[in-house]
Image (cartoon, rainbow, N blue to C red):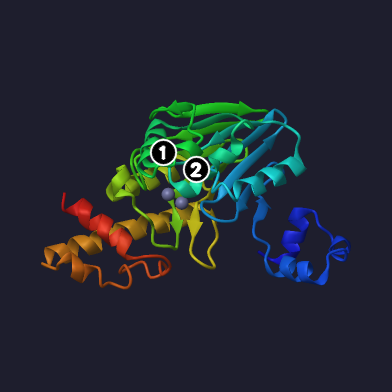
Amino acid sequence: MQRRNFLRNTGLTLASLAFLNKESLAAFLSDPTWKIKMLTDDIGIFSEKGGTIGFLLSKTGTVVIDAQFPETAPHLIEEIKKKTDKPFNFLINTHHHGDHTAGNIAFKGLVGHVVAHENSKANQERVAKEQKKEDVQLYPDMTYDAKGWMQEADKEKIQTYYFGPGHTDGDSIIHFQHANIVHMGDLVFNRRHPFIDKTAGASVSNWIKLLNKTTSTFDKNTQYICGHAGPGYDVILKAEDLKAYGSYLENLLKFVGAEIKAGKTKEDILKATEIPGSPEWKDGDITRPINASYQELNS
Ligand SMILES: [Zn+2]
Ligand SMILES: [Zn+2]
């Protein structure tokens, strides 16, 4: 982030920086570890490590989407407490992965309810058990099925959608209707090779349909937030970025399918350095989407 934005967003002034000693000033200027960006007066994003967090500050209370890690969530909580003294009413998890839910625990005793799709909760419980991390979880206590969930918060209306499996089998899309801002969680990896979690029921082919359904559900002015982006790319997106990501997934399936048909082994296919037709996807591990697509096309 640009330093000027950082200063503005954190409410620090150049005058207050003068009170820092030389070492901490150098550390401060070189290493702002987290950043907050407001998209409207009351809706913002928080980025530090892991999936982008979204939040809404309303007269009736605060709503947070995703929680990153136990060591980063407290930074978000501190920043929100500087902005409002209203209670944390809801924490919504877009899906179960640790870089979105491990920080739930920081909200223990602080948040009214943790909300998620029922598959997301089941995945969270299963993985915590496998990793023997059950003692550091704060599980969703409110779940919903394909019908989604709706909650009003002063002038804002929050609606969650479930369009079937994509990145996992429990990914929600969360719409702030009044502001027309949608949090996609990890349903979009902007110009970055995705993680496709086959151990949690992911589906590349349904992911493509789900993205089409998303762009037809919302309108051309909708702003989208995504969990992860490649270096130099934003986590705030427009419909055309979702379409570009949908074409990436189509190109991925087409490429792997054609290679299988041509008699290539999985090892050969994994030697690819880019997905033909989607050269912007350079960052991240290309073997993960190829492996997942190979598995999907062979089952
Ligand atoms: Zn993530
Ligand atoms: Zn994820």
Residue at x 50%, y 44% (from the top left corner) = 102
Relative to 154, say whether 129 is above or below. below
In this image, 141 relative to 268: left or right?
A: right
**Residue at the spot of label 1:** 124
In this image, 129 relative to 31: left or right?
A: left
User: Is disc 2 placed on a helix, strand or loop?
Assistant: helix
Q: Residue 144: which quarter of the image?
A: top left
Crowd class of label 2 (few under 14; some 14 to 19; many from 20; radius 10 Å): many
On the image, the x and y values in percent for residue 154 come to 68, 28
In this image, 116 relative to 59: left or right?
A: left
- Residue 11 showing in the rendered view: yes
The residues tagged by marks 1 and 2 sit, at their Cα atoms, a distance apart of 8 Å
User: Is disc 1 placed on a helix, strand or loop?
Assistant: helix
Q: Residue furthest left?
A: 263
- Residue 202 showing in the rendered view: no
> Quarter holding the N terminus?
bottom right
Crowd class of label 1 (few under 14; some 14 to 19; many from 20; radius 10 Å): many
Hey, what amino acid is under mark 2?
Thr
Q: Residue 143: which quarter of the image?
A: top left
**Residue at the spot of label 2:** 101
In this image, 293 relative to 211: left or right?
A: left
Residue at x 39%, y 28% (from the top left corner) = 145
On the image, the x and y values in percent for residue 54 come to 59, 45
Numbered label attached to residue 22: none
On the image, the x and y values in percent for residue 281 come to 40, 66
User: Is 190 in front, or is 117?
Assistant: 117
User: Is 128 in front, or is 238?
Assistant: 128
Hey, what amino acid is under mark 1?
Gln
Circles 1 and 2, Cβ within 8 Å, touching? The answer is yes
